[in-house]
Image (tube, rainbow, N blue to C red):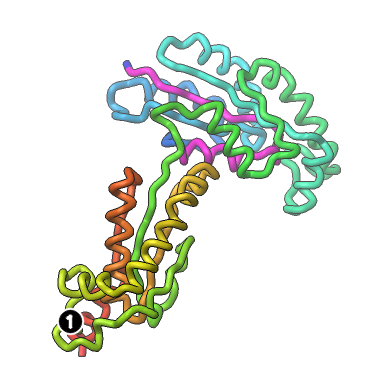
Amino acid sequence: MQKINLVIITGMSGAGKTVAIQSFEDMGYFTVDNMPANLIDKFVSLLTTSETGDIDKVAMVVDMRSRRFFDDLSAIVNDLSDNPNVDFRLLFLDSSDEELVARYKETRRSHPLAEEGRVLDGIVRERDLLSPLKSSSQHVIDTSKLTPRNLRTQISQQFATENTTLPFRIEVMSFGFKYGLPLDADLVFDVRFLPNPHYIPELRNQTGLDQAVYQYVMGAPESEAFYTNLMGMLNPIIPGYQKEGKSVLVIAVGCTGGQHRSVAFAKRIAEELTADKWPVHLSHRDKDRRKETVNRS
């Protein structure tokens, strides 16, 4: 039998359970949305057997969408608290009636307990039904004045450990402007002002990963000046992206065709960031695009 870390997320409809479950997923939890309460015992029993492998952190949302089974939840919570194989915590998300009404009006969705009545009627009924669960919850977060980012931060502060900290990595990529901007780029740098190896016959068919091209690009005085200024900007702002909870920072470097200058620059940036102990993945989107075009023709 293995011990699991289990978090059940419940609370008022519209209080932020979707953001919460996404936050736990980002922290490496196995997540289940809208779990029927009467299936929790079976699911936990499965997880605590040796057959489940390395699933030892689970977060699940149980709410009024499964209201036919919701009455069982209080008894199940008591059983989980007494289970020696489960490190169990209950997270209750709350919000003011005014804020919940405003959120439902904004999304134009109906409240699960409103039926044919007003949204506020459903909120009042749900608050009454959930009162015992809120009282027994180890963690209660009022999201009335929280942005989704603020909620993610609070959840991270309360639930993250050394093994569940929010992941962060840097993707450094080269690309060619002639093939379009990368859609997922956070920071884009243009190196088309640098000397172009394309016009050197012996370098034309090589790439920025080849030593001759790399030295040609990086050996130019303007390249060194630009690189120094670029890293002087990146080094202090990268920790800020991590602090704000960003999981992936995409740094894109572009030249005309994505074969020479951008490849060399991306390679050097990735090497320095790696030396600074950042988790880095380097890719070259268009490095072989010209070669593939020639072969097809």
As drawn, 132 above or below 205: above
For label 1, the crowd category at 10 Å Cα-Cα, with few meaning under 14, some 14 to 19 and many 20 or more, is some
Report the number of numbered marks: 1
Give the magenta range: 2-26
Disc 1 marks a residue whose amino acid type is Leu
Q: Where is residue 145 in the image (x, y as percent from the top left)?
A: 74, 39
Q: Where is residue 86 in the image (x, y as percent from the top left)?
A: 44, 17
Residue located at (46% from left, 41% from top): 26
Pointer 1 residue: 203
As drawn, 16 above or below 106: above
Q: In which quarter of the image is residue 164?
A: top left
Q: Position of residue 242 (x, y in %)?
A: 48, 44
- Observer-nearest of 132 and 202: 202
- Observer-nearest of 52 and 162: 162
Residue located at (35% from left, 59% from top): 172
Residue located at (40% from left, 65% from top): 252
Magenta stretch contains residue 22: yes
* Secondary structure beneath label 1: helix
Judged from this view, the residue extending furthest toward the bottom is 297
Q: In which quarter of the image is residue 85?
A: top left
Magenta stretch contains residue 200: no
Q: In the rendered view, does 117 fall on the left or right side of 160? A: right
Q: In the rendered view, does 246 fall on the left or right side of 54? A: right
Q: In the rendered view, does 212 fall on the left or right side of 165? A: left
